[in-house]
Image (cartoon, rainbow, N blue to C red):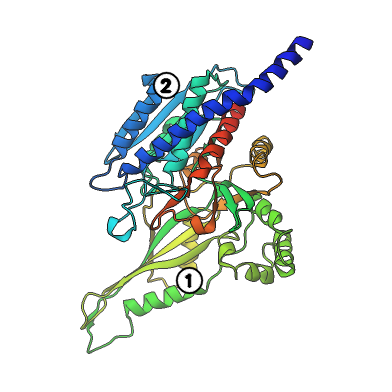
Amino acid sequence: MRHVAVFLAVALVAAPAVHAQTNLQAEAQALDLLKRGIAFRTVAGPGNQTFEYATYLKGVLVAGGFAPEDVQVEKVGDTAWLAARYRGTGKAKNGAKPLLISGHMDVVEAKAEDWQRDPFTPVVENGYIFGRGASDMKYDLSTMVATLIELKREGFKPGRDIILLASGDEETAMKTTQRLAEQFHDAELLINIDGGGGEIDETGKAVMFGLQGAEKTYADYELSFTDAGGHSSAPTKSNAIYALARALDKIAGYQFPGEINEITRASFESNIKASDAPMADATRRFLANPNDAQALAYLRSFPGLIGQTGTTCVATMVSGGHATNALPQRATATVNCRIFPGTKTSAVQETLAKVVGNPALKIRELDSGTVASDASPLRPELMALVARLIHARFPGIPIVPSMSSGASDSMWFRARGVPSYGISPIFMKSSDSFAHGLNERTPLSEIAPSITYYRGLLTALAK
């Protein structure tokens, strides 16, 4: 076996120079892709350029070695989706089901008059790139595309197909995500480059890395009361606005029970060491008994932990009456709920109706383009791989499983039985986080480590 050892030694000596050269090429391409991507106004509504952006990405992928027939772009209304298949040998160790990569091309609206710089003109300044989508999420999409092209350039042959799926309305209706999940749900797992990520403190020290393995179900409910109304000079005992006000007051005072799943348990356990004594004690008690009222109340006194301990519902919109001098004939409110994985939206609707306790209440779930999904299992091999790749950059930092209170494309794939994980490698300071906000930006220093991370992830998972 000596010749094998010699070959490996030569390969290990030669590899850094080769990889440094190809990484530089990929890094330059990623930055170019990001600049060009920001310039596409991929916002829902008139002037939406998502189809044009998808067509541009297809051209880049084909030029980078993908067969034209392996890159699909489909227009859906005013938006579009893209699917790019990196064909494998079919000889993967644990079966040949494909590895899915999920991301999205659309961005939230941005008004130029509100920004310091035009949101759809990429600006590189002081080590940052500014523009709508600079972080959410054209940065990761650009580095992933550049990584896939680099692997093609090097002749990498995965054991299973790798399929990049880019949706076009993740920020709104998620109709393209539904279609992608319907077509590509027969897969080993999905890695979502729009979830997870690392935190850096204000001194530049890495604090932790979050791996998203679950997300709460988004649901909107319309609550309404109707009445015959009448002249305001002759008030009656029944009043739709008063009935709605009493109903909302009851909902405001209601607390859903405490809940724990594998993801949130791991997250809470990882935080105990860094917590002060009261927080550590409350966390231990909650993990031992999620119905511990005192522990639950303490944890829920911190806004960042409220959503991690169970379902939440809050009134977000109200409307009532039809004239200033008339008794209201109708009063409505929208209650937004973020539902703990494993609980049906119908069950939450029933709970809200019971809490209000007024048979005159009419309540219905609004179409929000979402679906309930269970938490994904914490796969030991994936956790170990991510830890190895992250620790190569930041040795020893905690790898913390997390549950998102928002919704992402992973939801539709989890609902189809595909284990899905948010694993974006970008590390940022909280003070740099402007996704969905004004003057969105991301440090350019994350491009190089992102490509290194994605190379390691894809070559290991697609063996």
Q: Is residue 65 left or right of residue 118?
A: right
Check disc 1 and report the residue beneath it. Answer: 251
Could you tell me residue 32's position as x and y percent?
Answer: 40, 36
Q: CA distance from mark 1 to mark 2?
A: 54 Å
Marks 1 & 2, CB-CB < 8 Å contact: no
Question: Are there few (<14), some (14-19), or many (20+) residues within 10 Å of tag 2?
Answer: many
Residue drawn at point x = 58 percent, y = 60 percent: 310
- Residue found farthest to the right: 2
Q: Quadrant of residue 91?
A: top right
Kind of residue sitting beneath label 2 = Phe
| Circle 1 SS class | helix
Choose between 379 and 441: the one closer to the eye: 441
Could you tell me residue 367's position as x and y percent?
Answer: 36, 52
- The answer to whether any part of residue 168 appears in the image is no
Q: Is residue 448 left or right of residue 224?
A: right
| Circle 2 SS class | loop
Kind of residue sitting beneath label 1 = Ile
Choose between 365 and 19: the one closer to the eye: 19
Q: Quadrant of the C terminus?
A: top right
Residue drawn at point x = 40 percent, y = 26 percent: 61
Mark number, residue 281: none
Check disc 2 and report the residue beneath it. Answer: 66
Placement of 171 over or under 337, stated as above or below: above
Could you tell me residue 222's position as x and y percent?
Answer: 37, 63
Choose between 74 and 42: the one closer to the eye: 42
Q: Quadrant of the N terminus?
A: top right
